[in-house]
Image (cartoon, coloured by chain):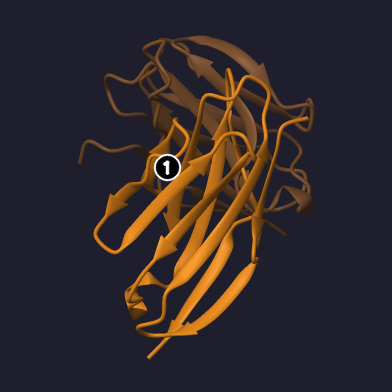
Amino acid sequence: EDKVVQSPLSLVVHEGDTVTLNCSYEVTNFRSLLWYKQEKKAPTFLFMLTSSGIEKKSGRLSSILDKKELFSILNITATQTGDSAVYLCASKGAQKLVFGQGTRLTINP
Amino acid sequence: DTGVSQDPRHKITKRGQNVTFRCDPISEHNRLYWYRQTLGQGPEFLTYFQNEAQLEKSRLLSDRFSAERPKGSFSTLEIQRTEQGDSAMYLCASSLETGTYNEKLFFGSGTQLSVL
């Protein structure tokens, strides 16, 4: 059974801190790993990673994939209160996307 | 708005009633997915369609659940004889599958179901 595990499940930091969110996966016929941000309703797409060692970057967010260790991280630098959300990691095999439980990130001013 | 649309946004029903949700995907997308999400959990896969064909259903999906995508465009998810355990957010997502690895799912805002 395909499986995605995220850690930590919850994280509270102060504005300006840097955070690292972790995602490990076991997926048959791995195709890609995706990160989403969910604030209220619809998860919104952040990154898709298919190759090991290539960092994807968007502003203060970055992510990297390790296909040997079956692991991905999402980094957020200089956090802002608007970064407070649930961050979802998902892995795609041949067919469907399998999600982890999410990491609830809270940024305190 | 050219994103994924779901209707209704909220549904309150009594146990034992039937409910139906609708999803309109992004127009050129050939794949449509249904997920269920409960509080504190990630989205859980229910089923997906490629065009009008239903290609996979989760083993967790009981026979009270049925989904259709009759013309390969919008989809409906019906739950018969609802139970309190069906209370959840039902998310629809769509994507364009081209045979490469670059499939990204775009989600609708979901239908929040409360079964009393």
At x 40%, y 38%, the residue is A48
User: A89 or A43, which is in the foreground?
Assistant: A89
* Looking at the image, residue A58 lies above or below residue A33: below
At x 37%, y 18%, the residue is B73
At x 63%, y 35%, the residue is B45
The brown-coloured chain is labelled B
Q: Where residue B42 sits: x, y (%)?
A: 62, 51
Residue annotated with mark 1: B7
Inspect this view and state whether residue B107 appears.
Answer: no
- B52 left or right of A82 in image: right
Q: Where residue B114 sits: x, y (%)?
A: 64, 57
Question: Which residue extends farthest bottom?
Answer: A109
- Picture mark count: 1
What's the amino acid at mark 1?
Asp
Q: Secondary structure at mark 1?
A: strand
State which quarter of the image contains the C terminus of chain B: bottom right
Output the chain of dot 1. B
Q: Where residue B31 sits: x, y (%)?
A: 44, 20
Few, some or many residues within 10 Å of mark 1 (<14, 14–19, 20+): some
User: A13 or B29, which is in the foreground?
Assistant: A13
* Looking at the image, residue A67 lies above or below residue B54: below
- B61 left or right of A67 in image: right
State which quarter of the image contains the N terminus of chain B: top left
Report which quarter residue A109 is drawn in.
bottom left
Inspect this view and state whether residue B60 appears.
Answer: yes
Report which quarter residue B66 is drawn in.
top right
The orange-coloured chain is labelled A
Q: Where residue B4 sits: x, y (%)?
A: 34, 37
